[in-house]
Image: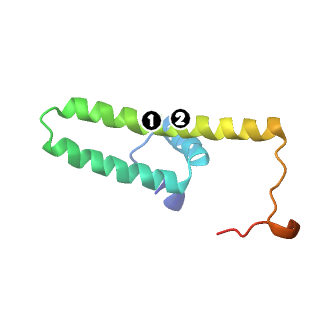
Amino acid sequence: MYKTCGTLSLYNENELAQIKSILEDVSKDRLLSLIYELSELANTIKWSTQKQIVFEAGIIKLCTNVTGLEDRIKALEDKMENKNVPRQTGRRGRRPLQI
């Protein structure tokens, strides 16, 4: 919303600066995924008898998914750099077909 109209009357200048920095670091797909997951969490909370526990567990799950993926990607990048993995080729020296 901020990217399209450039203003949000709900937020002060500090909050707008934080929103801008988040927009630079997070992809549109990730934001849409978070909105979808938060919507599912809201529906789960609606029918739960222990709303606070479900909410806290859901937020922790959302936060750990991001850091877990970042750690896995970093570990894979480090392995590839350290091993100097050559590019794989298919038969007769051609690159494999990408699907």
Instruction: Give the residue at x 53% y 35%.
Output: 67
Q: Is residue 76 left or right of residue 38?
A: right
Query: In the image, what residue type sits under mark 1?
Result: Cys
Q: Residues within 10 Å of mark 2 (few under 14, many from 20)?
A: few
In the image, taking residue 94 as reference, residue 68 lies left or right, namely: left
Residue type at the position of mark 2: Thr
Residue that extends furthest to the right in the rendered view of this protein: 93
Q: Nearer the viewer, residue 37 or 21?
A: 37
Indicate the secondary structure of the residue bearing disc 1.
helix
Disc assigned to residue 67: 2
Residue at image coords 30%, 31%: 56
**Residue 92: x percent and y percent?**
87, 69
Whether residue 94 is visible to the viewer of this picture, yes or no, is no
Distance Cα–Cα, label 1 vs label 2: 7 Å
Residue 52, given in percent of the width and then of the height, sits at 22, 30
Badge 1 density bin: few <14, some 14–19, many ≥20, Cα 10 Å: few
**Left-right relation of 30 to 92:** left
Where residue 48 sits, quadrant-wise, is top left
Q: Disc number at residue 75?
A: none
On screen, residue 95 versus residue 3, left or right, reads: right
Nearer the observer, 52 or 3 = 52
User: Is residue 82 depicted above or below 92 in this figure?
Assistant: above
Residue 83, located in which quarter of the rendered image? top right
For mark 2, give the secondary structure: helix
How many numbered discs sit on the rendered protein?
2
Q: Residue at x 77, y 41 (%)?
A: 80
10 and 4: which is toward the camera: 4
Instruction: List the residue tagged with mark 1.
Output: 63
User: Are the residues flagged by discs 1 and 2 in contact, CB closer than 8 Å?
Assistant: yes
